[in-house]
Amino acid sequence: MARLWCVGTMLAVCLGVPTAHSSAAEPPQVIPGRESGRSIVLNPDGSWTQIRVRSVGGTFMLSQRNSADNGQTWGSYSDVLALPDNEFGTMISSGLDADGDVQAFLVRKRDFDQPGIAGVDRFLDLYQTRSSSGRTAWVDPPQLLFEGFIGQLMAPTTLADGRILMPFHSAVKDRTAPTGASISTVAYSDDRGQTWTVSASRLTAPVATDFNGSLDGAVEPIIIDQSRFGDPAIDRQWMLIRTQDGYLYQSFSEDRGETWSDAERSIFPSSNSAAAYLWLPDRNGNGRPELILFWNNTRICPRYEGQGVYSGRDAIHAALSCDGGRTWAGFREVYLDPSRHDTPPTTGDRGTANPFTLPMHNDERVALLTGNGPAEATIFIDPDWLLESSRSSDFSNGFEGWSAFTHVGEASGFWRDRVIGPQIIDNPDGSGSKVLHLNNPEPRLDRPGGQDGDGAIWNFPLGSRGRMVIRMRITAETKVADIQLTDRFLDPADDTSIDVAVFHAQFNSRGQLIGDTDVVLTPDIWHELSIDWDISTQQALLTIDGSQSATLPMLFASPTGGVSYLRLRSPYVRALDPAGWMVDSVSVTVPEPTVLGFLGVGIGCRVGLLRCWRVNAGV
């Protein structure tokens, strides 16, 4: 399947059509705690039904309960189907077919507890069962769909013609490079789940032997039915796959899920984590739905002295598409792990990953159920919040909205201690405000060698062009002040991530901008530094106090076509830096999202992203 990727300014025509979206969207509302989202289905009245496997008197039962308030409270369970044996686990995924009946997918253990290789000697087989007659009865027993070692189940997708697609992954060999343990594929049914066919496509993704994590391969696929948008140019199904290659991988089907193209990188940077999506009803009056995507737009840090380190799940992001997935706006943090600065637990999962999303009852917002351990949460999100064009921070609320941790000490079992690196201190000018102080001191007991310099990272709406303003101050003893604009969340103090900095400015011990000695910061006074970037010209203009200026080249061609993060560092560069430097405030603006037409086709929505992709060269 031929693909054309267009990098730079999107061919677009301003239509000048006003939108019906609200101009003042509320930020996401976070409610601690969540339910298992992939087992929840939507009822015709907008309420939710959760399907679960539970033990009742020693017998494993398929049970259900309802919530009329978006998961805040739940009714009692009713048992709908006794499972044949207790080898069925509690992992379950549910969806609705074209008749509104529930399609439930489960896994059953087979030789699970014996030693051996997953998918060769030990098995978790995939099964399916369903309700019938408007959920008044259930089909018994569950039927076998696939023998293998099934991983985390994702949600099924039902096409307009009634075909059901169930994406899944299975470990099929030992965990080795170059493609890891697992393949992703799809089971499909054309008779409301009575019979099933498994696609012959076996999708893989590359892995590296030194990856900071397990080499699972292509796992946890989701399927977005792009034909739902109603444009013949994208009459297809789109699979997004969790990988260990730093990106979500993608595959396309032109035959309703029977065969799939080889998996390849998508435009979405990602840690080793899954994605979720939701089609939104027409909000623009053009008769077409919008698409919202949730994923961890983060990069995993490298191993430490050969040992694994937890990373890549400190923030979860959302992007909005008004043209069926061709272009995207937002790339905003909708949820930061509230314990991201703390020492992680030594066992169990943590972080903001594993998203599932649902429409809300009597509410135009979207419900995101995500997170593990102490970060489990339900987040209510106004899609218009993703389309805002500015953000600012002055540290009056401490590290709210910022991530500023650093890993310290030894690593063992994918665990390493964390502490906050930079500090919030009183402004040295005596104004009473709070400022961010980044440094690299010696000695510090929590930093062996004192070489893990401070870092802080902050998210803003994605922009292919825009202006970042930083009020900053160095001292006569400052060694290095480092500023980066990036397209993804990076561990704040990770020195190895400079390779994905889209724009980079560094000031040396004399206050000079490295690469341009005409731009110099005066010690012990506050300066206003602005960076005006434009991806289409592959340059940014750095200006100090409205006078001194220099051009910064674009160092990394982001597949997103923009930047969405400010990263501040006090890195170790040949010397420790106990004096460090300070930041009083930051603010950013990107061009006001406008009504755009994609390649001459009127879409009728606001899009702030100037990055596009097409599947066929003729589209």
Image (spheres, helix red, strand yellow):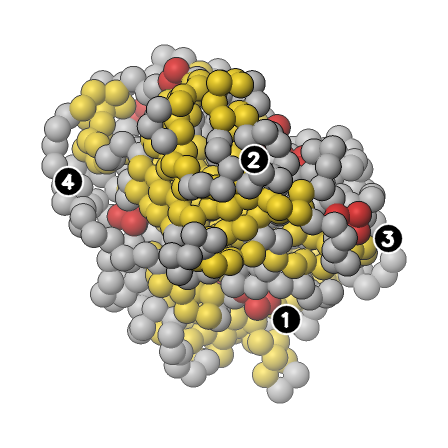
Q: Look at the picture and state if 234 lies above or below 411.
A: above
**What residue is shown at x 87% (from left), y 57% (from top)?**
115
Mark 3 packing: few (<14 Cα in 10 Å), some, or many (20+)?
A: few
Label 4 element class: loop
The Cα–Cα distance between marks 2 and 4, rounded to whole angstroms, is: 40 Å
Compare marks 2 and 1 and give the one earlier in the sequence: 1
Label 2 or label 3, whichever comes before in sequence order = 3
Circle 2 residues within 10 Å: few <14, some 14–19, many ≥20: some
Q: Point out the residue furthest to the top here.
A: 618
Contact, CB < 8 Å: mark 1 with mark 3? no
**Residue linked to disc 2:** 482
Closer to the observer: label 3 or label 4? 4
Query: What is the spatial separation of the Cα atoms under label 1 and label 4, in whole angstroms?
Result: 54 Å
Whether 471 is drawn above or below 49: the answer is: above
Instruction: Identify the residue under disc 1.
Output: 84
Badge 4 is on which residue?
19
Provide the residue designation for mark 3: 116
> Is disc 3 placed on a helix, strand or loop?
loop
Q: Amino acid at mark 3?
A: Gly
State how far apart marks 3 and 4 are (Cα): 58 Å
Sooner in the amino-acid sequence: mark 1 or mark 3: 1
Dot in front, 1 or 3: 3
Spatial CA span between label 2 and label 3: 49 Å
Q: Residue furthest right?
A: 115
Of labels 2 and 4, the one closer to you: 2
